[in-house]
Amino acid sequence: MKAGRLDGKAALITGSSSGIGRETARLFAAEGACVMITGRSKERCEAAVQDIRRKGGTAEYILCDLYREDAPGLLMEKMKASFGGIDILVNNAAWWKGEAFLSVTREDFRKGFSAYLESLYFLSQAAAKQMVEEKRAGKIVHIASTAAYYGERGMSVYCAAKAAVVNLTRAMALELGSYGICVNAAAPGTTVTDSEKRPDYVLESFRRMGALPKLNTAEKIAPAVLFLSSSDSDGITGETLVVDGGCVQIRMPEKLYEEPMTDWKR
């Protein structure tokens, strides 16, 4: 039997009960990794685990609210108990409520940065500490966004937080490289998933911007995350891999879509 690219590796993927996270978990398991599914829905987590096990993979799940201060410790304890430690962390979990800049409250701002930056920061710290203690040359992959590179109406908090994730990736890479830990990010563009709630006219506008004829799906993003998590990328750290069908390479139009963004929330 051909060896998988992640044989013998233990991977924690946050927000992996649906969307990009779930597809990444499926691919990791198919490549031989022991995968820890996380989420807040027991039903969806169980479904994700059963999907992997039916195909011969190894997976467990833990229900976890990443906003809690004790979440990083709980997740590392679970990884240690279930798989003996951690080799790969994929920070994918997300929460976001689209809101016009003039309507964003301090609570919106704090919650957005907590979801996209604070929880990611301290979970990465906990994972890195465990990797260092166990002398594992691990991989940490953040799911950023092309929103880090350009502004979009109704997404000011999201854009700011994702830009911070891109630069955090560089800083972490500098500090953790001496321990053999690679830190990179994948930056998807607009991606069609089972949780996509944006109106069709918005999705069509993004589709027209890209060099490729179709918007990406979760199945197109997961292989990029696999690459950054495997030995194929051992010589790469501090980088952000853009996976957006060519949108960032094309000059953003001044007016992306005709209708205002105040009529939808995500």
Image: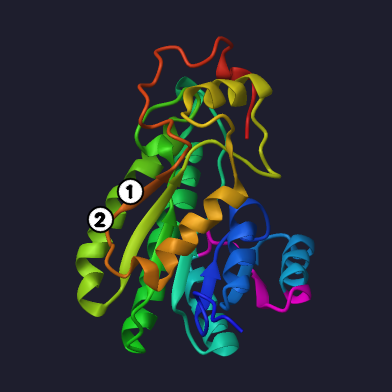
Q: Secondary structure at mark 2?
A: helix
As drawn, 265 above or below 259: below
**In this view of the protein, which residue sits in the foreground, 124 or 31?**
31
Q: What label does residue 72 carry, if any?
A: none
* Whole-percent x, y for residue 70 in the image: 50, 71
Q: Are marks 2 and 1 in contact (CB under 8 Å)?
A: yes
Q: Is residue 158 left or right of residue 196?
A: left
Q: What label does residue 166 carry, if any?
A: 1
Q: Which residue is mark 2?
A: 170
Q: Residues within 10 Å of mark 2 (few under 14, many from 20)?
A: some
Quarter occupied by the N terminus: bottom right
Asked if residue 251 is among those painted magenta in the image, a careful observer would answer no
Q: Is residue 151 left or right of residue 192?
A: left
As drawn, 51 above or below 200: below
**In this view of the protein, which residue sits in the foreground, 66 or 48?**
48
User: Could you say which quadrant of the image residue 63 lies in?
Assistant: bottom right
Identity, as a three-letter code, of the amino acid under mark 2: Arg
* Whole-percent x, y for residue 76 in the image: 49, 79
- Which stretch is magenta? 53-68
Q: Label 2 vs label 1: CA separation?
A: 7 Å
